[in-house]
Image (cartoon, helix red, strand yellow):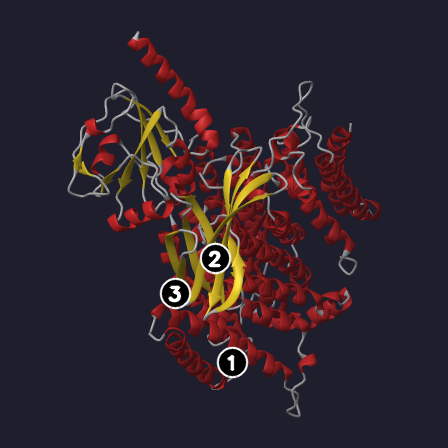
Amino acid sequence: MKSIIRFIPLILFFLLAVLLYRGLFLNPQSMPSAMIGKPLPNFELPTLKSIEQRVGRDDLQGDIVLLNVWATWCIQCKYEHPYLLNIARDPRIKLYGLNFTDDHKAALNWLKQYQDPYVFSIFDEQGALGLDIGVFGAPETFVIDHTGIIRKRFAGPINDQVWQKEFLPLIETLEAEMAAGAS
Amino acid sequence: MIPELGHFALIIGLAFALCLSVVPLIGVAQNNHQLINSAKPLSFGLFFFVAISIFLLGYSFTVDDFSVKYIAGHSNSLLPYYFKISAIWGGHEGSMLLWVFALTCWTFAVSVFSKQLEKEFVARVLAVMGMIAVGFILFTLLTSNPFERLLPNFPLEGLDLNPLLQDIGLIIHPPMLYMGYVGFSVAFAFAIAALMAGKMDAAWARWSRPWTVAAWSFLSVGIALGSWWAYYELGWGGWWFWDPVENASFLPWLAGTALIHALAVTEQRNTFKHWTLLLAIFTFSLVLLGAFLVRSGVITSVHSFAVDPERGIYLLVLLAIAVGGSLTLYAFRAANVSSPSRFTFYSRENAILIAMSILVTATVTILLGTLYPLIIDAMGLGKISVGAPYFNAVFVPMMIALFLFMGVGPLTRWKKARKGELAKHLNKTSIFSVFFGAAWPFIYAGEFSLSAFIGMTLGCWIVLAVLKDVFINAKQADGRLKFSAVPLNHIGMALAHAGIAITVIGVTMVSTYEKEMNIKMAPGESANLSGYMIEFAGTKDVLGPNYSAIQGQLKVSLDGEFVTLLKPELRTYKVQRSGMTEAAIHTNLWRDIYVALGDPLEQNSWSMRLYYKPFIIWIWLGGFCMAIGGFLAILSKRYRKRVLVTEQKLTQAKPAVLQEA
């Protein structure tokens, strides 16, 4: 009996190793979403800055819309925030925020403290819209094209590398599509 | 040519490591003294060639050889020379080479400073270290070669080092951290050698102890520096984020702390041997696991290295061989380890046992929190992230319990405390600590605060316990105090415990009384931060070697008296085109004033972050105290006695053990 006890650490480690092996083939940042290729579902939610005002799908104006899911409880959001301020200056896109299951006061404070890169932020206190589009955590960023179709979902913080690799090519494709559609 | 020589030196190092991991073991098996003695020169060769390799990489950095891919990606001709050198470990490949170099330093040190040990035993230890070196040198050569060339079309200029890493903190933090990480391989090698030999006694623990304490001290410094760097460089004023990479360094530290205590008991009382063996394996496994987590990309982190699945697989195989192999060895050989336990409830053994249990529980809890996103993901349940609220909620209560026992342990006798003695020692200190803790918030802030009460009570409690312990040890038979009579390792222990108390006080004060202001300031405006007047006098443009910056000028005064001029910067690095805030901090023992520039607003006004951080420097001072305590303990004479002495002691101790069995 006692000798079996001595194998317990080995067995525990074996289980851990299997888990880590599985983990290697999961990319924590790329996530398939059932929503890709589908239109953004409609919603009716307040904005962060004025609880009275309700916004919906049609208020996300712009040819290429980026919807960034953020919250004050998320450290990586803090990390990507300076870069979001950068992106917001790109004339090709419009950046909207989806403040996800957050405290209203804290969220407002955050935008005051670190500046507001968003055209506006949707205040999704219950996570209703987040549930509809399949948000798992924050930060996450969705790309919506000029016809209102979700084209991409990216989980994890955006930095320069990610932007160059994951977003810029798609934005160029979308611009080409728009040009083709217009002509 | 030079980079190829570096590459070649590393390959020769690999050859030495291969020989080192095989030849001495054959010698031990055949009882061939010539082969046993070869361990030392082989260790030297390994160290020498890896040292040449890392030196040549550093040389190539200083001469701006951008035909080397790694250098082109992490350096630039405008970079000051000291950052060119520290850029060696500014990325994945070079930091692996630093890792290997640290490992060979330890191997070399073990071979030099082990004259008093049995030759067969040292041969086994060095062979195990050789095996680890083989694993990591192969990893470096096969998946992360820092000497890879970009020929024939190489860039004329490098991409520059990440601006966040262009800092004094990065020059010293990684070497300290890696010395700590890799140092635990020595404890691991000692444990494996003991299991191979089937012999585990107090002498073994005595040999292993100074090495383990040294590694732990390096790691303490490394973690403290890392936290300090994050504090002043990231510009958020935070000092610990429970990021997976931070956890990867903190987990071995916690397990290593438990290991040091287990070793102390094994050496002095010849018991807790299974604890010691398993903790030695566990600690080094956590080091390897940390390397895997950080470098394979299974977990997202703010500072993870470039992701490459091939590296992940290799590291996982390495982890499986090292940990799986050692635990298998343990499972089959541990039956030979007798670990008699003879102590009562009120004994130092029991206090340490409780402390170790708490430390291991804390380690496992943090490990679970770190791996939880991965577990959920692997089971297909979705993606989540575990943040600071979880870690604080589980970690803080456990530490409170641990600190309570830290005040009891040093004052309790081994085996059995005398009746009434413990109460006599503890009554006064506990009453004084509670009084001090309760009075502190009133004196400091004028009102009660529960967190300040708990933190200050515990800090005072730990300090009083070790002070009392030192006084008891210094007391001579005739009642005089003679501090030179206190053994050095005892003073080291006291200092390390006091370091914990200092850190606890720092953490308590900062988290209870810090002030934060986010305001818009126009030139000439001033703000009141906890009594300090901070006046914004405008901005200046300044030029650095590889960046240009806007520098804010803020006059800080207290009660009308000028204190300092703070100059926070907003830098733009020329090559990477990235902006970075450089906070300005005025530090003294009682508080930090921390100013960071936000963004320019209309009419020369700026958004600004002002922090008042009381006692924050204590957090890192505590870390350094722990490390100094550790290094003092190593200097203790007891570790340099000849084998003969320890063997005599053992023969004396043995009959008692037999009787018990």
Q: Nearer the viewer, residue B10 or B652?
A: B10
Mark 3: which amino acid? Answer: Thr
Per the image, the residue denoted by label 2 is B594
Do discs 1 and 3 share a chain? yes
Q: Nearer the viewer, residue A169 or B331?
A: A169
The tag earlier along the polypeptide, 2 or 3, is 3
Q: Secondary structure at mark 3?
A: helix
Q: Nearer the viewer, residue A178 or B532?
A: B532
Name the chain letter of the residue that bears numbered label 3.
B
Name the chain letter of the residue that bears numbered label 2.
B
Q: Residue B222 location in percent, x, y?
A: 59, 53
Q: Residue B504 location in percent, x, y?
A: 47, 66
User: Is B39 above or below relative to B3?
Assistant: below
Mark 2: which amino acid? Answer: Tyr
Q: Residue B626 location in percent, x, y?
A: 58, 64
Q: Nearer the viewer, residue B289 or B583?
A: B583
Per the image, the residue denoted by label 3 is B512
Q: Is residue B410 in view?
A: yes
Q: Residue B614 location in percent, x, y?
A: 46, 65
Q: In which quadrant of the rendered image does the N terminus of chain B lie?
A: top right
Which of labels 2 and 3 is toward the front?
2
Which of labels 2 and 1 is toward the front?
2
> In the drawing, what numbered circle is on residue B417?
1
Q: Secondary structure at mark 2?
A: strand
Q: Secondary structure at mark 1?
A: loop
Do discs 2 and 1 share a chain? yes
